[in-house]
Amino acid sequence: QVQLVESGGGLVQAGGSLRLSCAASGSIFSINDMGWYRQAPGKLRELVAGVTRAASTNYADSVKGRFTISRDNAKNTVYLQMNNLKPEDTAVYYCNANVKRYGDIRYSDYWGQGTQVTVSS
């Protein structure tokens, strides 16, 4: 099995910063894309940022210039540095990884349990 464990969420004032981390563990042969999604109350889950194994990145328009995604392939870990946070960034943030386990033929998507980010005005 594969587990994704997130950390780093919390409560912060508008304009502040937080850094989220997500470590993947288990029977991992290879990880393709990794990313962060978020879901606010009453809204659909949306992509915040993604990073390929080769470190190419993409961002939602709403976070460009404020958030930075990065990964450490040796540690199977993805990070999300969030600066200049706004109240509208308040949501549960989920880590996602596209993983091939030992013995698997194809990659499959795995999700973390989610971490709450709350930005007060």
Image (tube, rainbow, N blue to C red):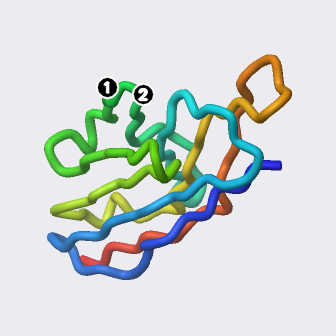
Other residues around mark 2 within 10 Å, as few (<14) / some (14–19) / many (≥20): some
> Which residue is tagged 1?
56
In the image, taking residue 107 as reference, residue 41 lies left or right, namely left
Quarter of the image that includes the C terminus: bottom left
Which residue is labeled 2 in the image?
Answer: 52
Q: Is residue 10 left or right of residue 38?
A: left
Mark 1 nearby-residue class (10 Å; few <14, some 14–19, many ≥20) = few
Q: Quadrant of residue 71?
A: top left
Identify the residue at horizontal 61%, vertical 53% (top origin).
Answer: 24
| Rendered position, 62 above or below 41 | above
User: Hey, what amino acid is under mark 2?
Assistant: Thr
Q: Secondary structure at mark 2?
A: loop
Secondary element at image label 1: loop
CA–CA distance between discs 2 and 1?
A: 5 Å
Residue type marked 1:
Ser
Image quadrant assignment for residue 9? bottom left
Q: At 76% across and 19% down in the image, what residue appears?
A: 106
Give the number of callouts. 2
